[in-house]
Amino acid sequence: MAAPPDLPPPEELLRRADEMLKHFEGGRWPSHVSELRRTGYPLHVYGVGLVARKSPWGPSTAPVQFVNTGVLARVAREWVPGRGEEVHFRVFHTPGKFLPTSFLKKLAELSKKLGVGLLEVVGQTGALVINLRKEHAEQLVDELRAIGTDVGGSGDAIRALNACVGPALCEFALFDTLAWYAEFHRDKRVNDAIATPGFPYKFKIKLSGCPMDCARANRADFGLIGIWEGAPEVDQEALRRKVEAGEVDPRRLEERCPSRAITWDEKSGTLIINGERCRKSMNCIRSAFPAIRPGRKKKVAVLVGGGVKGRFGPKLGWFLTMLDPDKPRDAVGLAFKVIEPWDREGVPKDRLGDYILKVGFTEFLRRLGMEASGRHVANPTYIPYKVLQKEERDKFLKLSEELGR
Ligand code: SF4
C-alpha cells in the first residue's frame, strides 16, 4: 500500500507517533498504551498508524512446520520508520471458556519466554491469542502441545468451536453445550479439519443452550440451539404470587410476546400460552422465571448457513432439523453431511450460506438426502432473512432471479 499523502519525514513521524501514544496514557482511566509498554509489542508501529490515519500493517507469513492454521503474521509497511512485525498463534480455548488459573499462568509464562509477553482474548468466540517471536515459533508449538492445547482456527477450515457456558452456570440451558463441544473434539475428522484448511471458506460451529443464543449460533455455518416443543410451562400459583408482589406485569408479558401467543385471564388469574404460536423468544421466561420455564420436551435445533461475512452479505441460519439432546454424535455426523456438498461444489470464498443461496434451500436439502417440510418454511414470516431491510430483501430477490436464469 502506497504511503499516505503528506506524511512527515521519518523523525517527525516518530515524534508525532510518540506524542499520540502519550495522549492515550493521560486521564484517570486504565490505558491500553501503558499496558502495551510493559510488553515487547512494536508500539511505534501502532503510533505511526494513528498519525497516518491508515493501517500501518501489511500481510506477511510465518511458516511453522506441521502447523497449517492458526498462525497469523503481519509486517509494518515500508513507510513505517523502524518497521516491525507481529506474529501470533491462535490457541484453542475451552468449552464455555472455563480456563483454569493454572492454565492461564502457563500461557502467560510461555508468552513471556517465547513471545512479546502479550496475551489477547479476541473476537466474539473469545479466542486466545499469544503474540510470539518468529524465531521461537516451532518451540512454542511444542510447549503449547505439552500443556494440553494447540494452535489452529484460521483460514478455510473449521474454526475454533464456540459454546455458551450451558448447564455449568446457566439455569436456562436445554442441553449440555459443553458435553456436545467435547464430543465434536473427540472426532478425528473435526480436529483434522481444524488443523488443515481445505474448504471453500471458513466453517463455524457454535452451540447455544437456549434461544437466548449467547454463543450466537444463529449466525454460524452450523449452529445448534437448545429449544423445546410447544408452550413454555407455567406454574400458575407461582406466577400469581409474582404478579401480586408486583414482580411481573402479565399485561406486559402479553404485549411483549412477539408472536402474540400469550393471553392473561384477569378473572381467574391464569396465563395461557399457545404452544403453536410460541416462537421461543424467551421474553416471558426471562421476565417470570422460574414461574414460567421452558417446556419439558427438549430438542436441539440445527441451523445452517448463517454468517456475518460472506459473498452475499450477512445471513441468519436456515432451520434444518431437530436433534435429540442426548445424542451429540448425531450432530457431528450431520455437520459433515452438511459440509460435503458445499466442499465438493462450492467455489472459493463461498460460505455455506452463499452456496445454499446459489443452489436453493430445497435443492440443498435434496443433496443432503432430506425432504423439505412445513417446518422449513411454516410461515413466510419465518424466512430467516426477513429481518433484513426491504432494500436488502429486494437485492436477494433480484439475485435469486439472476441465478435462476
Ligand atoms: S445461550 Fe441460553 S443456556 Fe446458554 S448461557 Fe445463554 S442463556 Fe444460558
Image (cartoon, rainbow, N blue to C red):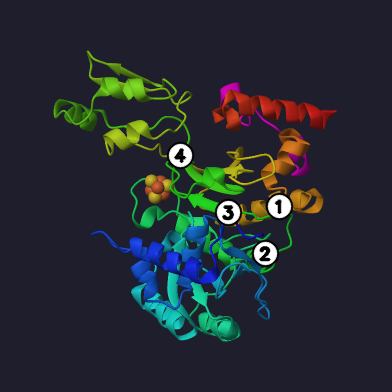
Quarter-of-image position of residue 66: bottom right
Sooner in the amino-acid sequence: mark 1 or mark 2: 2
Q: Earlier in the sequence, mark 1 or mark 3?
A: 3
Instruction: Identify which residue is drawn at 74% across, 54% down.
Output: 200
Q: Nearer the viewer, residue 105 or 344?
A: 105
Residue linked to disc 4: 297
**Helix, strand or loop under label 1:** helix
Q: Which residue is mark 1?
A: 339
Q: Amino acid at mark 2?
A: Ala
Q: Position of residue 69 (x, y in %)?
A: 64, 69
How far apart in space, not on screen, are marks 1 and 4 (Cα)? 29 Å
* Residue 229 shown left or right of residue 308 in the figure: left
Q: Sequence order check: which comes first, mark 1 or mark 4?
A: 4
- The amino acid sitting under disc 3 is Ile
Q: Residues within 10 Å of mark 4 (few under 14, many from 20)?
A: some
SS at badge 4: loop
- Number of the front mark, 4 or 3: 3
Residue 283, percent from left and from top = 36, 32
Given residues 228 and 302, the one toward you in this image is 302
Q: Residue at x 48, y 67 (%)?
A: 12
Q: Residues within 10 Å of mark 2 (few under 14, many from 20)?
A: some
Horizontal arrangement in the rendering, residue 274 relative to residue 364 (left or right): left
Q: Residue furthest left?
A: 245
Start-end of magenta stretch: 363-381
